[in-house]
Amino acid sequence: MRILVSGVNYAPEVTGIGPYTTALAEHLAHQGHDVVVATTFPFAPSWRWFESPPRWRTRERMDGVDVWRTKVVLPRRLTATSRIVFDSSIGFTSALTTLSIPRVDVAICLSPPIQTTLAAAIVRFKMRKLVVFVQDLPTEAARSVGILKEGPALSVGRSLEHLAYRLADHVVVIANAFRKYIEGVGVNPGKISEIPNWADVESIRPQRPDQVMRERLGASRSDFLVVHAGNMGAKQDLLNVVAAAAALQEDSHIKFALIGDGQHRDRVSGEIAARHLSNIRVMPLRANDEFSAVLGAADALLVNQAPMVVDSVLPSKLLAYMASERPVVVSAHLKSTTADLVRTSGCGVVAHPGQPDALAAAIRAMASADPLSTELATMATRGRAYVEEHFGRASILKRWDVLLADLAGTS
């Protein structure tokens, strides 16, 4: 089959959706399919071009995949208007790529942005089957962090999103909560499949804490080190973590390392400086081959979400955390998909979101655990066992093979 994968993020980006899109495309190419990727130049999570695009469009061969990159409108500041312009430019350029290649058997459009699916529907004559792959519920995510507020703009956004789901031949979601949402807007349950993201249990493996790495992250051998690794945006609400660190200033053995980049990084760094905090530091993303060592250096790994984020996102870093066999502390809505996964797997503890004292209390309790107790070690091993059983890469990619074969058979 000739397969088009259309989405914002792709290698060499190493956080968020990019690694999953890359691995899916490369897997399909290795299965013998002719795979084309329509994307833009790498920019995530900093929202700055890794390198200035050399021209408006490039084409290259990467691990058997034909990658078309087209320059888009990259906003300097993320607002509702700038995000709509950015997402629409992705949809427009992906349609241009679709028009530039031979007709495809299946187009897989990543959402967000939903505009890739809407654009694909406009050039539908270039594809036999259209699949929308829902990694996020874009309008609900925008509402949950205040980018969109209840009103005409949000209503229009929801209508367009729901239209995209109905226009697609098939909808793939990464979580059951997404399925329920999409069924709730009138999409036939028979055309929805749940295929989650996978945990990278091959490259992220349990390992003994490396003291050199711990020192680079600001912790001594006797400290309790809490690490956040990944995007620093509105959904992560990391000012809540800074406030929790302030509440733990007297607990001198508890240290925080916030590793990553994103729209809110400067704001977070500024708040740390304004509070004169010495127990928390912000650091850039580590090289990909160091990521497992960074996770392994932590005593606990942190997921923090904004209070209104419920079922619009499922952070990919949570699966990486679990694969690293470290206990997890989560500050998230108690009814969220994130909190539910932590409770179901037994891999950590959940605190109320947006409440620094609650997060501080949860971390203090973990840091105060009896060294001879197996409680934290049990959480860690449960997490690793759970992702090995439910989120193995090979078995999940096999589900994509089966789905695409079924879709090809119904052409």
Image: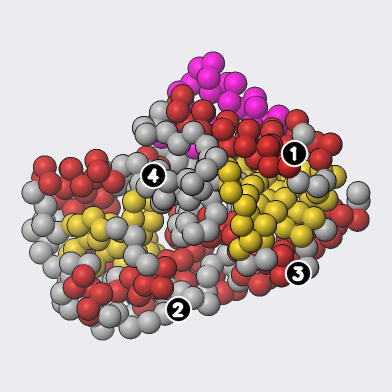
Residue located farthest toward the top when viewing the structure as drawn: 152
The residue segment tinted magenta is 139-166
Q: Quadrant of the N terminus?
A: bottom right
Of pointers 2 and 4, the one earlier in the residue sequence: 4
Q: Secondary structure at mark 3?
A: loop
What type is the residue that disc 3 sits on?
Answer: Gln
Nearest the camera: 147 or 47? 47
Up the image or down, 185 lies above or below 385; here it is: above
Of pointers 1 and 4, the one earlier in the residue sequence: 4
Q: Give x and y (percent) for residue 407.
A: 84, 53
Question: Does 78 appear in magenta?
Answer: no
- Please give the name of the residue rendered at 30% of the width and 74% of the height, measured from the top-left corner: 297
Q: Circle 3 sits on which residue? A: 31
Name the front one of labels 3 and 4.
4
Crowd rating for badge 4 (residues with CA inside 10 Å; few <14, some 14–19, many 20+): some
Residue 250 shown left or right of residue 312 in the figure: left
Q: Circle 2 sits on which residue? A: 205
Crowd rating for badge 3 (residues with CA inside 10 Å; few <14, some 14–19, many 20+): few
Q: Circle 4 sits on which residue? A: 48
What type is the residue that disc 1 sits on?
Answer: Leu
Q: Circle 1 sits on which residue? A: 99
Query: CA separation, marks 2 and 4?
Result: 31 Å
Q: Is residue 34 visible?
A: yes
